[in-house]
Amino acid sequence: MGQFLWTGFDYIGEPTPYQTKNSYFGQLDTAGFPKDSYYIFQAEWTDYKTAPMVHVFPYWDFNPGQLIDIQVCSNALRVELFVNGRSMGRREIDHQHGRELVPCYQTAYEPGNIEAVAYDEACHVIAREERHSFGDAVEIHAEAENVGRLWFVRISARDAEGYPVENANNRIFVQVTGGGRLLGLDNGDSTDFENYQNQDKRLFSGKLLAVVERTSTENCSVKIASYGLEGCELVLGEDLEPENSRSYVNQNDLPIRKIELTALGSLYLTPEHPQVSVRVKLFPEILNPQGCDLLEWKAVNDTGIEFPYVEIGRTEEGLLVSARCDGTFRLRVTAKNGKRSADVMSHLEMKASGFGEGAIDPYQEVLAGLSADRNPQVIEGVEHGVNCLGEAEEGKHAVFGFKRVDFGSCGTEEVTVQLFANTEHPVSLRIWDGYPGMEGSRLLVDGRYHKKPEWMVFQPESYRLPERLTGERQLYFETEDEYQFKSFVFTELSVSLSDGQQL
């Protein structure tokens, strides 16, 4: 029959996560720039016979050799992807009954272009779209559209060859004189808390919108400038036709737009080759090498939880990654660019084998998302925890566990968990030494968690164990209730020595 969207546009308020300022429901951001999802919906609700379209994403700028998922959406019956002129194959799209409405291709990144081509039932080309790799921004590009008393000026950055720099985040300065005034700037970035009515704002995903109000019949001049870039001037008059000119501002606010990581060796680490050097290069290139001091790095798993069995050191060229235990992980390097959280991110996928399985330290906070064993009643939760979906009336218990938890020789007699239960009633929590109910397993805690709920606020609760827990154990959690489980930590006991000191 149709589909309901909440909403068409992003809007200020209802942010998820709460650290940001607006919703993410829209198919267009707050500046009116379409997201990739906009084109996905367009592909399913328009007719290729009257309005053929095709869209390929993401933009084309990654680490050399990094495997990238390239997706193509179209209202046509079949599509084909080309990478630097090489066909990646044609895909049929069954818009009525198909399960793959957005064909996905995977290929290693290489500079050049990717192009999506759409075909009709006779295999005639009816639409095509290309995205090209790009270098650092060298100039500002702007174009204006008039709607009544308003001009909407779309601002972007281009490289030396004229290609859009689609991850540019340069700070742009806008000055309006003559028969108009600047109403505001918006880049669609939900993490940007700067005032909309400032005269400057950074590009986001290479774009910025300036809204200019016409105040008289006099021509209106819109000067647009940025540090290190050739600026431009739009002269908007009665005919609304822009005239190009040049301007420049000497304001040094140059954030990182890309972190390029290149492994100088194998990404498969073994006891014979336990480490690899990674070269780190920043863009714009003017930021090297001092800009490396602005970076943060860590090893994480696929869900973003820190992988504790990797050491990362700094070298002249970049980073040295050393593995201590088996596992797959990503080297993740980020830059905040003055924001509250990561603004630019880059990663390399790595694997370590032959070292042996790593043990968990229970005396540091352990995120539930690291659990190695889960039943179907446990799914991914918020803040790197898990969401327990136990249903007591149907006899379904949520169970998740950790295979190697090393309590050491001193041991512990207390555990503290962090939960969010959206109910006024107590919920159950059982902690087992071993898999629940299996022969040889012991029930350590048969407790209740009962806190007045605050929406998505995790609150701690501690439980005493019936005996001291030492050595290496398999630890499992069980409940028949529904709640979010974030983490646990045990209190380590100390051993008194003969001279009164503690170990």
Image (cartoon, rainbow, N blue to C red):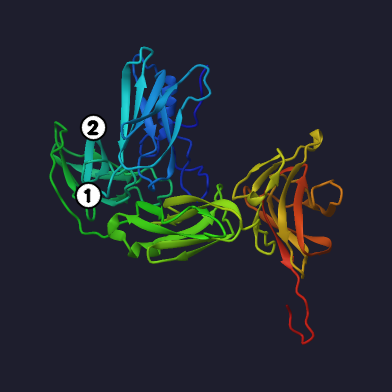
Which residue is disc 2 drawn over? Answer: 146
Quadrant in the picture for residue 30:
top left
Q: Nearer the viewer, mark 2 or mark 1?
A: 1
**Residue in the picture at 75% in, 74% down:** 494
How crowded is the residue under tag 1: few (<14 C-alpha within 10 Å), some, or many (20+)?
some
Residue 177 visible within the image: no
Q: Are marks 2 and 1 in contact (CB under 8 Å)?
A: no
Mark 2 or mark 1: which comes first in sequence? 1
* Name of the residue lying farthest toward the front: 272
Which residue is disc 1 drawn over? Answer: 138
Question: Would you place residue 191 above or below residue 45 in this image?
Answer: below
Which amino acid is tagged 1?
Val
User: Where does the C terminus fall, quadrant-wise?
Assistant: bottom right
**Residue in the picture at 58% in, 56% down:** 307
Residue 126: x and y in percent read 32, 19
Quadrant in the picture for residue 50:
top left
In the figure, is residue 141 to the left or right of 62? left
